[in-house]
Image (cartoon, rainbow, N blue to C red):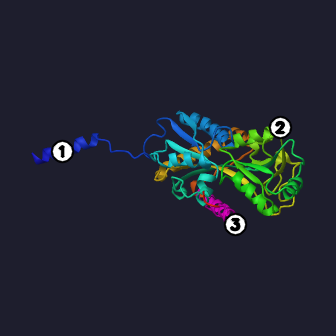
Amino acid sequence: MRAITLVVLSALTAFVAPAKSPAEEVYPSRVVRIVVPYPAGGGTDTLARLLADQLSRKWGQAAIVENIGGAAGNIGASEVARTTPDGYTLLLSSPGPIATNSFLYKEMGYDPARWVPIALLATGPYVLVLRTSFEGSTVADLIARARANPGKITSATPGIGSIGHLSTVQLEMLAGIKTAQIPYRGLGQAINDIIAGHVDMMFDTPTTSLPLHRDGKVKIVAVGTTERVRELAELPTLAESGLPGYRAVTWYAMVAPPQTPATLADRINRDVVDVLARPDVAEKVRGIQMEPVTKTRADAAQFFLEETELWGKVIKQANIPLQ
């Protein structure tokens, strides 16, 4: 009887499938939610929607973008950090929630060091934008007016800790000026006030500001990269404009909640890199004034570390108080 029982148990075991971890299941088998921690309309949102569309086609499952703005990206990032680490909720963000907010906020609701890197998606320059009615069209003009009117030049920033904010801080430090900074919940809202003439200046991405510059609704006077930008070759860098060492370049990345399995993160990375490497998709990314990046998760993790160190130094040197 004992021998018969063992045989029966062995036969039954052969028909019982072992439980699969999330990384071993077919992925994705349902909708993937890509959270952008900013309002709709900025460069991060534009890139997210482009990538979501391409991933939906590749996966045969919908990838949807959800905008959860507020607190320089902390609200949306906090929500993602609390979700189940199964690959069905991902964060697509610019540097704040990944590399800089930890230097600026006492309470964030998440630990940036615990993100599971998925991919560095793209890089892009920041450009210095003025309202069209501003009295001057160069960086030198702006600095001269700011020195003559301390604290009177208004500058829009897309949330404390954003690269747009830190670009303004870096300008003030190197030029020896002080502006009246006005924080907004996102780039889209800020650029609208530049167009309306309510605010004097801001650092923006070419994704939103270049078409407006060409239409005469704003004026771009310089770029934050170390070399001139192809689409704005006639405009100098800020370093060329009397601020040597100035650099303001943003980037966009995808991360997953803490404890997401490495095998699952690797799988998503491969799919994202495959999409971005396609010539037609790469051209679309360049069309929104970004440069696509196709590297490994390890490369992304190292890049996040280096950027955290870079902007951490800027924040400390500027003595920006914790919020």
Screen quadrant of the N terminus: top left
Q: Position of residue 110 (x, y in %)?
A: 51, 53
Mark 2 vs mark 3: which is more N-terminal?
2
Q: Is residue 280 visible?
A: yes
In the image, the segment drawn in magenta is: 299-320
Q: Relative to residue 22, is residue 57 depicted above or below?
A: above
The disc, 3 or 1, on the residue closer to the chain's N-terminal end is: 1
Nearer the observer: mark 3 or 1; the answer is 3
Near mark 1 (Cα within 10 A), the count class, few <14, some 14-19 or many ≥20, is: few
The residue identified by callout 1 is 7
Closest to the camera, between mark 1 and mark 2, is 2
Percent x, y of residue 185: 65, 44
Identify whether 312 is placed above or below 37.
Answer: below
Q: Position of residue 230 (x, y in %)?
A: 83, 47
Q: Earlier in the sequence, mark 1 or mark 2?
A: 1
Prevailing secondary structure class for the magenta stretch in the rendered image: helix
Q: Is residue 299 visible?
A: no
184 on left or right of 297: right
Query: In this figure, which residue is indicated by the disc labeled 3?
Result: 317
Q: Please tell me which residue lies in front, 153 or 279.
A: 153
Q: Quadrant of residue 171?
A: bottom right
Q: Per the image, is 190 magenta?
A: no
Amino acid type at mark 1: Val
Name the disc covering residue 217, or none: 2
Residue drawn at x 68%, y 38% as measured from the top left: 41
Look at the numbered disc 1 and give the secondary structure of its residue: helix
Q: Is residue 204 above or below residue 196?
A: below
Residue 162 spot, x, y in % from top left: 67, 52
Identified by mark 2, the residue type is: Lys
